[in-house]
Image (cartoon, helix red, strand yellow):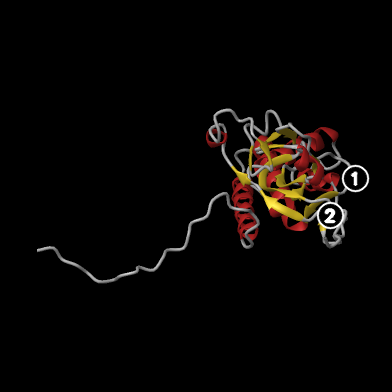
Amino acid sequence: MPGATILTPTTSGQSGIASGSDLVSQIARIVGGESEDNVRAQALDCLNRVRTEMNQHDWWFMKTTQSPITLSSGTRTYSLASAFHRPSYARLIDSAALPYRELRYEDDAVFVRLEPTQATQGLPGHYSLRNDFDDGHISLYPIPDTATATDFRLSVEYFARMGAFSDSGSVVRIPEEATNLLVVGGQAYILRERLKDSPVTIQAFQDFQRLMRLLIVQDRRIEDANPRFRIRRPRAAVDTTLYIRM
């Protein structure tokens, strides 16, 4: 079996957002309160409201792979990472971290009916997430047996949620393309709270929506999801003769 080189995630060197405090300063500046603690606290709240709205989407820059999960014989359910938002794919990997078998996603209604007893052990071929937000679990079927637990681990690639911002100098690992969206969105919210009748507030929300659309368009330029079902290509007709019944 060929060897494999396992790379640990490192910073890519690409331009990112400087820090949470920089974003807060840009938001607070529009109402003249960059140096006022209460305005900065309000700006931080508005910034995190934008983050919450952005978390309704699966962004390419939030796609990551969970550390391989060790399987146990007879154990069906395993814990997911706390930042887990939506799955891209799950697969079994061998001892050299090479892909061995992709698992098929099944929704809860199908998963519970795969077999009446749900007690079969063997090499898993399916996975399900009943309520990953509430319990943070992934379930496999068939249930891993001793051979599977010895030879394989579970690899899960997923879209993560953006964590809460803080008014600190900590580096934010988000591409610079998202900077304007976060700043303008935060400005729109703080203007609505402080100057709700100002034309500037209306313009800020229009700019916020425009920037959201631009980032969504950029995100969709490259397909980064693993479809849970595929539409097959149409087959050519075998016989194109037209028969008319008289």
For residue 65, above or below residue 165: below
Left/right placement of residue 236 relative to residue 13 reads: left
| Residue 169: image tag | 1
Residue 130 point in image, percent of width and height: 62, 32
Cα distance, mark 1 to mark 2?
39 Å
For residue 81, above or below residue 242: above
| Residue 204: image tag | none
For residue 79, above or below residue 51: above
Q: Quadrant of residue 145?
A: top right
* Circle 2: residue type: Ala
Residue toward you, 150 or 171: 150
Residue 56 point in image, percent of width and height: 63, 42
* Circle 1: residue type: Gly
- Visible residue check, residue 163: no
Category of crowding for the residue at label 2, using alpha-carbon neighbours closer than 10 angstroms: few (below 14), some (14–19), many (at least 20): some
Left/right placement of residue 42 relative to residue 201 reads: right
Left/right placement of residue 228 relative to residue 67 reads: left
Which is nearer the N-term, disc 1 or disc 2?
2
Residue 19 point in image, percent of width and height: 85, 48
Residue placed under numbered mark 2 in the picture: 96
For residue 98, above or below residue 190: below
Q: Secondary structure at mark 2?
A: loop
How many numbered discs, if any?
2
Residue toward you, 122 or 76: 122
Quadrant of the frame with the C terminus: bottom left
Residue toward you, 45 or 130: 130
Question: Residue placed at 65% from the left, 57% from the top?
Answer: 224
Q: Quadrant of residue 81?
A: top right
